[in-house]
Image (cartoon, rainbow, N blue to C red):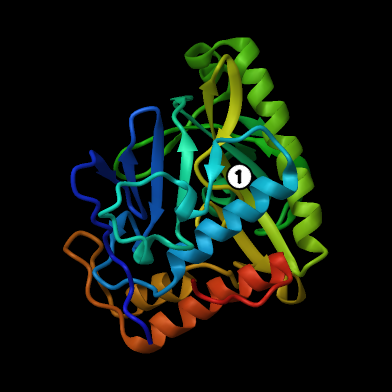
Amino acid sequence: MSQPLLQSELSGLPVRRGKVRDIYDLGDSLLLVSTDRISAFDWVLPTGIPYKGQILNRISAFWFSLIDEPNHIITTNVDEMGLPPDVDLAPLRGRTAKVKKTRVVPIECVVRGYLSGSGWKEYRQNGRVCGIPLPEGLLESQELPEPIFTPATKAETGHDENISFERMAEVVGRETAEELKRRSIAIFQRGTEYARDRGIIIADTKFEWGWYDGELILIDEVLTPDSSRFWPVEQYEPGRPQISFDKQFVRDWLEHIGWDKNSPPPELPDDIVSKTQAKYIEAFERLTGTRFRPE
C-alpha cells in the first residue's frame, strides 16, 4: 500500500491546517490541499488513509460540475494554478483545488433527509430535531417526510453546535438565511436523487457558503463521505444504525479497543486502513461511474 500524504509542504506560503485540508493563502485566492488525514471523535489520527484526499477532492469536483451551482472552484489542474516554479507538483496532483477567496458565512448549512446521529438522539428525547417537530413513531434511520434544514455554528475545534433557524437569521440576516435554506435543500434533493440511482443513500450533509462579488457561492467540499452520511441502498433497513461508506471501520475499531477518546489516539492496523480506503473508493466509483485511478 502506498504511503499516505499526512501533510503538504509549500514553503513561503501562509498555511492553515484543518482536520483534513491544508489551506494556503495565495493572496486573491486559496489553495486547498486534501491530505490523507482522517479524524474520529474530534481527533486527527496518526495513521492516514492512502488516496483519501484525492478521492474527496475528486468527488467534490464531480459534484460542483454536476449540480451547476455558483461555486468557488477556479481549477483542479495543478498545471494551471500558477504556483511558484520550485513547487513539486507531484504530491498535489488529484488532491488540490485553487479556489476563490470568499467571505465565509459562519454557519454550517445542514440538510437531513433521514433520522440519524444527533437528530435521532434529540428526536427520542422530545420528538424534534433542532426545534423542528416531527411525526410520532419514527424509527432510527427512517426517511423523513421531507428534508429538513438544521443549521449549526462552525466550530474550529470539537463539535459544531446545532442552532435554530431563528438564531441563524439573527447571525446572518433573515434574507440570507432564507436563501441559504432554500438553495441548500434544493442541492441536497438533486444530489440525493442522483446518488440513489447509483446505489447510495445520502442521509444528511452539510454545505458551506461564502460571499463573492456580492453573491452567495458554494464553497468547501460538497456531498462527500466526510461531509455526509452515505449508506448503501441494498443494505438499508430502518430501525437500526446503517452500514456506511465512510470511516465507520475506524470508529468501530477505536470503540472496540476501548480507547478513552481523551488521550492521543493509537495507530490504525493495516486491515482497518485497507477496509476504510476500499469504502472511499467504492463511494467514488458508484457516484462517478468511473474506476478510481490515483494521480
Counting labels gives 1
Q: Residues within 10 Å of mark 1 (few under 14, many from 20)?
A: many
Task: Give the percent coordinates (x, y) of residue 19.
Answer: 33, 52
> In the depicted view, which residue is nearer to us: 186 or 6?
6
The residue positioned 34% from the left and 87% from the top of the image is 270
The residue under label 1 is which amino acid type?
Tyr
Q: Is 173 drawn above or below residue 22 in the view shown? A: above
Q: Is residue 113 left or right of residue 81?
A: right
> In the depicted view, which residue is nearer to us: 139 or 288?
288
Asked which quadrant contains residue 67, the reply is top right
Task: Give the percent coordinates (x, y) of residue 279.
Answer: 55, 76
Task: Give the percent coordinates (x, y) of residue 107.
Answer: 48, 29
Furthest-front residue in this view: 85
Q: Is 238 drawn above or below residue 209 in the view shown? A: below
- Residue 98 in view here: yes
Q: Is residue 203 left or right of residue 82?
A: right
The residue positioned 53% from the left and 80% from the top of the image is 278
> In the depicted view, which residue is nearer to us: 159 or 208?
208
Q: Is 219 drawn above or below residue 93 in the view shown? A: above
Asked which quadrant contains residue 103, the reply is top left
Task: Give the percent coordinates (x, y) of residue 73.
Answer: 55, 40
Q: Is residue 142 left or right of residue 251?
A: right
> In the depicted view, which residue is nearer to us: 147 or 16?
16
- Residue 38 in view here: no
The residue positioned 44% from the left and 29% from the top of the image is 101
Q: Is residue 66 left or right of residue 55?
A: right
Q: What kind of element bears circle 1?
A: helix
- For mark 1, what is the residue? 123
The residue positioned 67% from the left and 27% from the top of the image is 181
Q: Is 150 drawn above or below residue 286 in the view shown? A: above
Which quadrant is home to the N terminus? bottom left
